[in-house]
Amino acid sequence: MENQFKDLSSLMTDKNAGKIAEEIVYIYLTDNKIKTIDFSYDLSMGKMSNTDANTTFAFDIDDNKTLLYMFKKLSFQNELSSEEEQKICEFMSKVATYLIFNHRAVLKNIVRKNTITDSDPNIIPLDVIEVCNIDILDLEKVEFSAKNTIKVNKMRRKDMLSTSVTGTANDLFNVYNNTGETLSDIIARKKIEGDPKYEEVVDAEWIRYLFEGYLVLYVDYSPVSQDELLDKIKAKE
């Protein structure tokens, strides 16, 4: 097993970290393959209340050639030592660094397009985006709950008057497990009941892949202050 991991670790280079970051971005830019699992935010006095991870996208790593190649090698490992796990975490941190420093503008566009679609960039600039985690699942080795993920589609208001948007995917999954209702029936019932978590939900669907990756972000959805907005307008005059 040591030789197997040595073979894998030889691939954990800066060059391959950069390639994986590029391939993840490419997936989101082609063939409408962006899958927004869920997003949430909570504003207090116009600012984000916390800096916890609040936005999750999924991607099919069958399309991510470098990452898939490395992950298949990893799947042959029977058990990893804590040192080996640490090396993998450090490598994925490099991927996150490349995403932020080389592809920040693309990430910003991906977030805006798939969360607060109709927002004005001058009002909601999305200036702070951090990659919190990049998770990979081998879906043939996990139970139904991990093989199947709920994608929630939300309608965003142009005026962004709401001070919070609550994550809905986990709640939907729990209700489904408890009642067996279809996702559409759950959403319809929750809207009738006035559940605020479902106020802006349009619909939801199950998604499943053989290998699936998750890009977990912290995004600052707070608007600029009125003074900052006036300064931007004056700067353009």
Image (cartoon, rainbow, N blue to C red):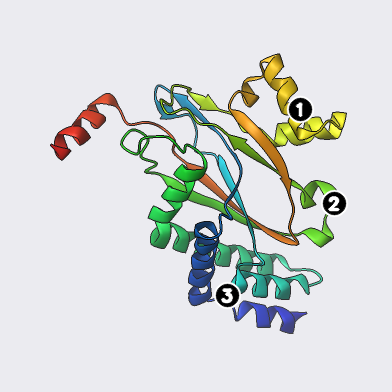
Expressed as whole percent of the image width and height from the top left, the position of residue 77 reads 77, 73
Amino acid type, callout 1: Ile
Amino acid type, callout 2: Glu
Front one among 67 and 187: 187
Query: Which residue is labeled 1 in the image?
Result: 186
Side of 229 where 97 appears, left or right: right
Front one among 182 and 129: 182
Task: For mark 3, give the secondary structure.
Answer: loop
User: Is the residue under label 1 in contact with that under label 3 (CB below 8 Å)?
Assistant: no
Side of 204 where 109 appears, left or right: left
Earlier sequence position, callout 2 versus callout 1: 2
The residue sitting at 41% across, 32% down in the picture is 222
Query: Which residue is labeled 3 in the image?
Result: 12
Q: Which label sits in the foreground, 2 or 1? A: 1
Crowding near the residue tagged with mark 1, few <14, some 14–19, many ≥20 C-alpha atoms within 10 Å: many
Crowding near the residue tagged with mark 3, few <14, some 14–19, many ≥20 C-alpha atoms within 10 Å: some
Task: For mark 1, give the secondary structure.
Answer: helix
The residue sitting at 65% across, 64% down in the picture is 61
